[in-house]
Image (tube, helix red, strand yellow):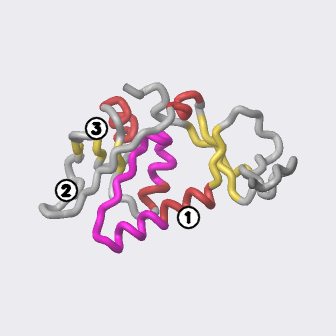
Amino acid sequence: MTAPVTSKPSTLLAPRLPAGIDTPAVVIDLDVVERNAHRLGTALAERGIALRPHAKTHKSIALARLQLAAGARGITVGNLGEAEVFAAGGLDAVIERVSDYHGVVRIPPGTPKPRVGEALAVIPNHVCPVIDLSDSFIATRAGVVVGTWPVDARGRSG
C-alpha cells in the first residue's frame, strides 16, 4: 500500500524568487554557493587535494573568483575559447580541454606551477547547456537581489 497523495507538498521544492525578477532567469543563492564552495574547498584541502573546479557549469569570472576565494587553486574550462575569457579576466592557472582521457594545463608566466607529486584530481563532469541560454545570473542573499553577474563565456562551448 502506498501513502496517500496530497494536493499540497509538505516542503517547498525551490526557494521563492525575490520580487521583480522576470522569468526565465538564472538565479543563484550566494549563501548556498559560498557555503558549498567553502565546504568542498575545506574538505579537499584537509586531504591534500588541490581543487580546480570546472567553470563549465557557470562560465562566470565572478563565480570563479568566489571559488578561488573559497580555496580552489585554479579553475578548469572545456576549451581554448573559455580559457581565453577567464585568462583575460585575470585568473591564473587554467586547466583546459579536459575530457575523460586528458587535459591541458595552461600556467601563465610567474604563476606557481604544481609541485611534482602534488595530488591533482580531475573529475570528469557532464552539464546541461542551460547556462548558455542566459546572459547573466541574478545573485541573491537571504531572498534579496544583491547583484547581476554576466555569463562571461556564453557561446564559447565547443
Q: Are marks 3 and 2 in contact (CB under 8 Å)?
A: no
Residue found farthest to the bottom: 46
Residue 41 falls inside the magenta stretch: yes
**Residue 123 % position (x, y):** 33, 50
What amino acid does circle 2 point to? Answer: Lys
| First in sequence: mark 1 vs mark 3 | 1
**Direction from residue 23 to residue 120 in the image, left or right:** left
Q: Nearer the viewer, mark 1 or mark 3?
A: 3
**Whole-percent x and y of residue 83?**
33, 37
Amino acid type at circle 3 is Ser
Residues marked 2 and 1 touching at CB (< 8 Å): no
User: What residue did someone put label 3 on?
Assistant: 99
Disc 1 element? helix
Residue beneath the point at 56% across and 37% down: 150
Counting other residues with Cα less than 10 Å from the Cα at mark 1, is it few (<14), some (14-19), or many (20 or more)?
few
Q: CA distance from mark 2 to mark 1?
A: 28 Å
Quarter holding the C terminus is top left
Left or right position of 125 against 116: right
Q: Is residue 107 above or below residue 69?
A: above
In terms of secondary structure, where does tag 3 sit? loop
Identify the secondary structure beneath mark 2. Answer: loop
In the rendering, at what x and y percent does residue 151 appear? Answer: 53, 36
User: Residue, x 64% and y 53% (percent of image)?
Assistant: 29
Give the class, few, some or many, for how many residues have Cα within 10 Å of label 3's Cα (few <14, many ≥20): few
Circle 2 residue: 113
Whole-percent x and y of residue 136? 60, 36
Q: Give the mark, 3 or 2, whose residue is nearer the N terminus.
A: 3
What is the distance, in whole Å, between disc 1 and disc 3 at their CAs?
Answer: 28 Å
**CA neighbours of label 2 inside 10 A, class few (<14), some (14 to 19), many (20+):** few
| Residue that mark 1 sits on | 35
Magenta stretch?
Answer: 39-65
Q: Amino acid at mark 1?
A: Arg
